[in-house]
């Protein structure tokens, strides 16, 4: 076989092998074009050619090398395109498939209610005051006119830390602190945790939340209290809501009242929520007792005020029809994700 024929054979063999190859073109490159490859082996025999033959064969050899390289490049591109095509098919995403919903956090119902209440009272010109949960007996009881022998002071009801310190049982403790630190006009609310030595059941918890309100200025009357609570009730429970006052007793207010709202489910006709009463008790309120003003350093002959206190859990349970207070503390995601 002449060198020329030899080269032609290498070319056709190589091109066929490249066209048939599925992956490893490198092996073929070594086989045909490498230092110890077939083309090189043929070219080593160039010395035996006549000077006339050499450039002719040289040119053919160059063409053969170029052809093989071109075929390899083309084949490589084809293989890459096929691989891409295969991946695209395999990894195809059906965007019409139902997705996996990302888990989102939820605002806790107690926070929802507290924020609502804060918004309402801020809208009425109140500002927010905070007080300590570990409190002196003085602010929690004494400054609020709660006498030594009052049952609320019993260790059955109150968590004492020392003889003089306790976990506050009511946010009313903040009233006494605010009176000491601010001059009228005073218009504040104070939300926060309170503690009572109660066993946990469907309606009691040793820790719960209250929101206190206090307004003191010249000429404040029960009419102002009524107007404020009426606005609050309509905003929180719906514009048809009415309120009513029932006489009551709190040591720190005189007169005192328990305040009911007309049932926001039945409108007052009677239903399961209001236990057929048509009314639902939601808070305690009254005119700040002159003695309480005095202890707070405010002259009761010049100033008067009203106060109210409500349970945040109670409002949340009413509003969202929660039948057990424990749901609010157990942090069961099935419960929380409903809000
Ligand atoms: N502190 C009372 C309680 O825990 C609620 C209360 C009643 C607060 C009347 C007040 C008020 O400010 O005027 O039961």
Image (cartoon, rainbow, N blue to C red):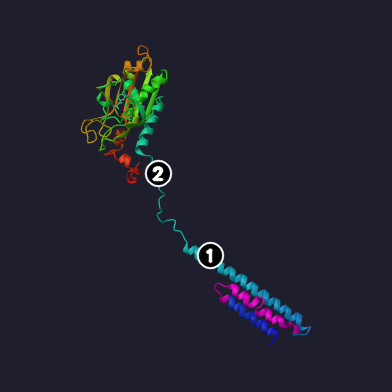
- The answer to whether residue 79 shows anywhere in this view is yes
Check the picture and name the quadrant holding the N terminus.
Answer: bottom right
Vertical relation: 176 (above or below) 331? above
Q: Is residue 193 magenta?
A: no
* Mark 2 surroundings within 10 Å by alpha-carbon count, few (fewer than 14), some (14 through 19), many (20 or more): few
**Residue 126 location (% of width, % of height):** 40, 25
Magenta segment, which residues? 19-47
For ligand 1, give the image quadrant.
Answer: top left
Q: Is residue 29 magenta?
A: yes
Q: Which quadrant of the view contains residue 227?
A: top left
Kindly indicate whether the residue at mark 1 contacts the one at mark 2 (C-beta within 8 angstroms).
Answer: no
Work out how far the residue at label 2 is from the one at label 1, CA to CA, in angstroms.
40 Å
Prevalent SS, magenta region: helix
Q: Residue at x 56, y 76 (%)?
A: 20
Horizontal side of residue 187 vs 203, given as left or right: right
First in residue order: circle 2 vs circle 1: 1
Residue at the extreme bottom of the image, as rendered = 1
Q: Look at mark 1 in the image and give the residue it sits on.
A: 84
Residue at the extreme right of the image, as rendered = 51
* Mark 1 surroundings within 10 Å by alpha-carbon count, few (fewer than 14), some (14 through 19), many (20 or more): few
Q: Look at mark 2 in the image and give the residue it sits on.
A: 105
Give me the disc on residue 15: none
Vertical relation: 157 (above or below) 97? above
Q: Which quadrant of the view contains residue 108?
A: top left
Kindly report which numbered mark, 2 or 1, lies closer to the viewer in this rendering: 2
**Residue 323 location (% of width, % of height):** 26, 39
């Amino acid at each position: 076989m002449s060198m020329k024929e030899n080269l032609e054979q290498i070319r056709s063999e190589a091109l066929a092998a490249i066209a048939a190859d599925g992956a490893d073109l490198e092996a073929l490159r070594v086989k045909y074009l490498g230092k110890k490859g077939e083309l090189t082996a043929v070219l080593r025999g160039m010395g035996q050619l006549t000077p006339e033959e050499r450039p002719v064969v040289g040119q053919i050899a160059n063409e053969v090398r170029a052809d093989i390289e071109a075929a390899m490049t083309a084949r490589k591109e084809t293989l890459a395109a096929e691989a891409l095509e295969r991946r695209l098919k395999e990894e195809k995403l059906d965007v019409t498939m139902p997705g996996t919903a990302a888990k989102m956090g939820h605002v806790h119902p107690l926070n929802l209610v507290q924020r609502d209440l804060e918004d309402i009272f801020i809208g009425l010109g109140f500002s927010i005051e905070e007080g300590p949960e570990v409190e002196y007996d003085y602010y929690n009881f004494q400054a609020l006119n709660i006498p030594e022998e009052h049952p609320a002071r019993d260790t059955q009801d109150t968590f004492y830390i020392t003889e003089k310190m306790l976990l506050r049982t009511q946010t009313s403790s903040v009233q006494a602190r605010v009176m000491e630190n601010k001059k009228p006009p005073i218009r504040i609310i104070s939300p926060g945790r309170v503690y009572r030595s109660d066993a946990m059941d469907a309606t009691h918890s040793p820790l719960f939340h209250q929101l206190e309100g206090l307004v003191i200025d010249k000429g404040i009357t029960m009419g102002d209290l009524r107007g404020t609570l009426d606005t609050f009730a309509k905003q929180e429970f719906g514009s048809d809501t009415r309120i009513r006052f029932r006489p009551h007793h709190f040591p720190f207010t005189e007169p005192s009242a328990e305040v009911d709202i007309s049932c926001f489910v039945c409108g007052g006709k009677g239903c399961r929520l209001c236990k057929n009463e048509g009314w639902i008790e939601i808070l305690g309120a009254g005119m700040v007792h002159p003695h309480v003003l005095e202890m707070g350093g405010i002259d009761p002959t010049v100033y008067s005020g009203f106060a109210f206190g409500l349970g945040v859990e109670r409002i949340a349970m009413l509003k969202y029809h929660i039948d057990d207070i424990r749901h609010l503390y157990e942090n069961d995601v099935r419960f929380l994700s409903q809000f």
